[in-house]
Amino acid sequence: GDVLTQRQDDGTHALRTGYTGAASCGASTGDIVAYALQQLINGLTLGSMYGLIAIGYTMVYGIIGMINFAHGDIFMVSAFIAVTAFTVLAAADVTSIPLALTFVLIVSIFFTSAYGWAVERTAYRPLRGSTRLAPLISAIGMSIFLQNSVQLTQGARVKPIPPVLEGGIVVWDAPGFTVQIGWSQMLIIVTTVILMSAFTWMITQTPFGRQQRACEQDRTMASLLGVNVDRTISYTFML
């Protein structure tokens, strides 16, 4: 009888241990799924930013057939322009977030477009009729020039920007991990979708988009048909 009772107690303990292990395994699986969902949100946000940069690469490459090595440096210049604009707003005691974002966006777009236009006029247009290697070397030189000019004027240290939009929405509150998406992440994703849709509409439905596609197919024939090739390429660099 004692042996049978001991075996029953052992079986009950094993059954309880099995239930505890299964519950622990389920919680771990839920945490893994939550962590994967959070990484998916982070990946969509980072991919949206890369997608916006890739639009400029593809538009320039589609028209002149060369990679603009200074493209990333122009984005870097745009970031420092945004830092400068935020500093000016802070000095002016501007606390309205919509006003600050609008002002910084307008200033960054204006000066970044000017940089893109200057890069096309100085690094690409004078060498457009030469060999393919010459504009490539010129673009690398422009990239080095922009990097060193910013380093001399702004310094080599990191310039952090405090988050303008804080907080967000909790997507899933798992037992061991909370999945959330920030307001800034939602703004980045929504802005990317809107801009990509706008660029797609512009290229496929507008006269300027038709001029871009004509320059991509044959710049000589496009110029004979009345398309201002130089202006189209300059506007593309500005975009």
Image: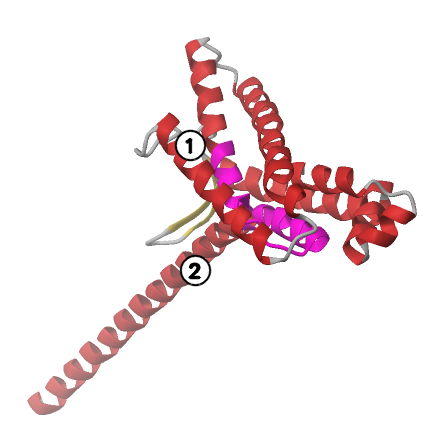
SS at mark 1 in the image:
helix
Work out whether 95 lies above or below 43: above
Residue at (42%, 30%) from the top-left corner? 163
Name the element at disc 2. Answer: helix
Give how far across and how far down residue 188 sits, in percent.
Answer: 56, 40
**Any part of residue 108 in sight:** yes
Q: Which residue is mark 2?
A: 36
Would residue 136 appear left or right of 128 to someone viewing this image?
left
Q: Which mark is residue 4?
A: none
Percent position of residue 32, x then y: 38, 63
Q: Nearer the viewer, residue 75 or 4?
A: 75
Q: Main secondary structure of the magenta part?
A: helix
Residue most toward the left? 2
Give the quadrant of residue 1: bottom left
Type of amino acid at the residue the image marks with label 1: Ser
Residue sitting nearer the eye, 122 or 10:
122
Identify the residue at the far front of this view: 130
Q: Which residues are magenta?
A: 49-78
Q: CA distance from mark 1 to mark 2?
A: 41 Å
Residue at image mark 1: 149
Task: Determine the residue positioned at 57% across, 57% down.
Answer: 133
Residue 73 x/y as whole percent: 49, 41
- Residue 69 forms part of the magenta stretch: yes
Q: Residues within 10 Å of mark 2 (few under 14, many from 20)?
A: few
Name the quadrant containing residue 162.
top left
The residue at the point 49 percent across, 51 percent down is 41
